[in-house]
Amino acid sequence: MNAPKPKDWIMGIAPYVPGKSSGDDGKKLVKLSANENPLGCSPEATAALNAASSAVDRYPDPGSTRLRAAIAAKFDLDPARIICGTGSDDVLHLAANAFSGPGDEVIYVKYGFAVYDIAARRYGGTPVIADDKDYGTDVDAILAKVNNRTRVVFVANPNNPTGTFSSRAEIARLQTELPEHVLLVLDCAYAEYLVADEDDGALELAETKANVLVTRTFSKIHGLAAERIGWGYASAEIIGAMNRIRLPFNVTTAGQEAALAALAADDFVATSRAHNAKWRQWLSDEMSALGNHGLRVVPSHTNFLLVLFEGKVTAEQVNAALMEKGYAVRWLPGQGLVNGLRMTIGTEEETRGLAKALREILAVSD
């Protein structure tokens, strides 16, 4: 019996591979592979989630009305120009679906977020990869790839999986030099980890420019990864097109309530940011001290570090050895990072334990 044949472009997609939480033998690992908040979510979000979890017999608000209003109030935005999704990944896919298809090109940077390639191919578009600048976004390389077939440009800022950051001036220059028919998607999943003077002006661009979409998430600093809640902001025309294809009831009632509470938990966000800054610097210093083993740390503006293994011990070897010692980090050969491991900043205990395990692994290799 012959099964129906899928579209050729669907079979060209490499399935997304999530970060591991257990070893090949099923042993539970310290999970530092998915950039989750080691402090969890705020008590207010937990309470809201629990209170709403019994309301399962009615569909959720299809427009996430109260959540959109709260986001708008928080960031001084127009609620009518906000769209909510099942994580920001959903919003990224909606953008690719609404604005690209067969014969169109979608640009993203080398070492960019894996979802961009999937989103482009899912709707028949052709992915186009722009070269990086020392693991960061190269605006000139992106612009050099633009032609009359380009429909969407994806830029994560800060970037995942490298942690690099592009300045306000560079992001503005990219938008200015892109043709008006190209949608610039600024994926700001890690924006809350930036300090005040690092604001890249993404929301301001989305407020004033007709071809800019900004995406954000509650999965990272807010600690609501399991609930899958993201949002985007753009011109009324862009949001209107995306809403035409957005699945109804796409954010659960409990998720909406938890996100509302998380949005108001400023103290928790500040505590999470401070914890991350402290232990990111500590881990960076520890990794840099191992430079004689060929380790190099890419400067990070996120809640993870990309550590490059440029000596005799490979990232693949270290990844396997860390799992043996009970730690899951992210090795990303599928994204061209054969020599790198992405390490989420965990609790103090987890971060110290990871560094100790790595020192032990490298000592054996001497």
Image: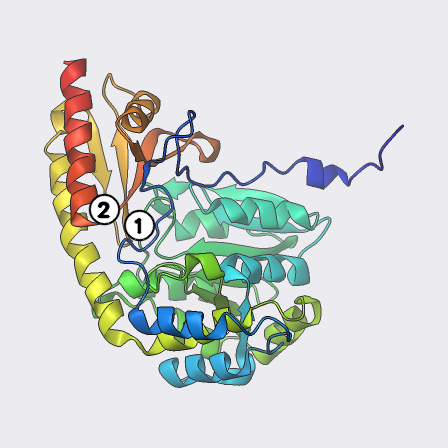
Residue 166 rendering spot, x and y as whole percentages:
33, 57
Say few, some or many: other residues with alpha carbon within 10 Å of mark 2 (under 14 / 14 to 19 / 20 or more): some
**Amino acid type of the residue that numbered disc 2 sits on in the rendered structure:** Pro
Q: Which mark is residue 164?
A: 1
Q: Residue 57: which quarter of the image? A: bottom right
* Position of residue 261 in the picture relative to residue 194 (left or right): right
Q: Which residue is mark 2?
A: 299
Q: Residue, x 66% and y 58% (percent of image)?
A: 97
The residue most toward the front is 54
Q: Residue, x 40% and y 34% (percent of image)?
A: 22
Nearer to me, 168 or 317: 317
Residue 60 rendering spot, x and y as whole percentages:
60, 75
SS at mark 1 in the image: loop
CB atoms of marks 1 and 2 within 8 Å: yes
Q: Is residue 107 visible?
A: yes
Nearer to me, 159 or 208: 159
Nearer to me, 200 or 41: 41
* Position of residue 242 in the picture relative to residue 219 (left or right): right
Q: Residue, x 60% and y 78% (percent of image)?
A: 61
